[in-house]
Amino acid sequence: MQEKILIVDDDEKIRNLISIYLENEGYQTIKAEDAIKAINILKKERVDLIILDIMMPEMDGIEACIKIREEKHTPIIMISAKSEDIDKIHGLTSGADDYITKPFNPMELIARVKSQIRRYKRYNKDTEYSNDIIEIGNLTINTDTRQINVGDKEIRLTPKEFDILELLARNKGIVMSISKIYEHVWKEDFFKSDNTVMVHITKIREKIEEDPKKPVYIKTIWGVGYKI
């Protein structure tokens, strides 16, 4: 899976420069010109690492880092023109994982990005990194907040619709029988004549598929059940 990096800096040239180097290394990037926009992005998207400038208008990087740390453990590399030890200490004690001063060598930044992502993956194999977010194509399922997005569009599902979609997504590529879906979601025995699952699948497709009659995500396996 391609790692996604959020670049937060009020200087457009620096945002674009960092983005070019990261994308050349195979990373996907999102850019934000201020901390408030960055925090809103983090509410909607899974991000693997944040590059955060300290000196920004309205909300600076220190305040933003503290706010991000209230909910997320995503690695944060702070960048700043300030090179004094006290500035680095403020950055690191606010929750940042690393600190680099401007002007910086882009290849040094890349090396630090790789190091932080590698370390985070190693120590978070069974937690937030792998379990809370499921991505399949443009479909993103946040099992913690129970939020669904197709691209930039937020999709609202009922609790049962969400449970069905999560079950299928966690078992991607595996055909789930109608009875198994029903018993897992409703926690009761399935009756052969019950079409509840089929009705719910139809409703989910209407919400997440561009063309519900030609579904991209939830496939029908005739005589067996459904799979993603």
Image: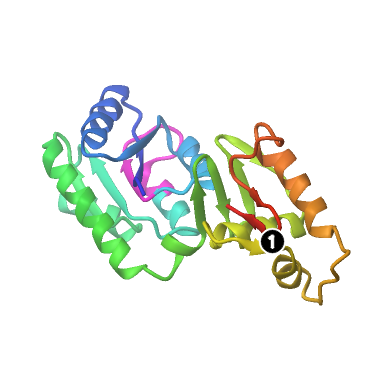
Which residue occupies the foreground of this view, 48 or 185? 185
- When the figure is inspected, residue 54 is found, relative to residue 221, above or below; the finding is above
Check the image and tell me how it is coloured. Answer: rainbow
Q: Which residues are magenta?
A: 48-64
Q: Position of residue 190 (x, y in %)?
A: 81, 72
Q: Position of residue 161 (x, y in %)?
A: 74, 55
Q: Is residue 104 visible?
A: no
Q: Amino acid at mark 1?
A: Asp
Residue shown at the point (81%, 77%) measured from the top left: 189
Q: Position of residue 16 (x, y in %)?
A: 28, 26
Instruction: Estimate how packed mark 1 is, as few (under 14), some (14 to 19) or many (20 or more) residues with alpha carbons within 10 Å.
Output: some
Along the horizontal axis of the image, is 129 left or right of 18? right
The stretch drawn in magenta includes residue 88: no
Residue shown at the point (77%, 75%) measured from the top left: 187
Residue shown at the point (45%, 39%) measured from the top left: 38
The stretch drawn in magenta includes residue 62: yes
Along the horizontal axis of the image, is 196 left or right of 210? right
Q: Considering the numbered disc 1 on the image, is that residue within a helix, a strand or a loop?
A: helix
Q: Is residue 158 visible?
A: yes
Q: Position of residue 36 (x, y in %)?
A: 49, 38
Which residue occupies the foreground of this view, 42 or 165? 165
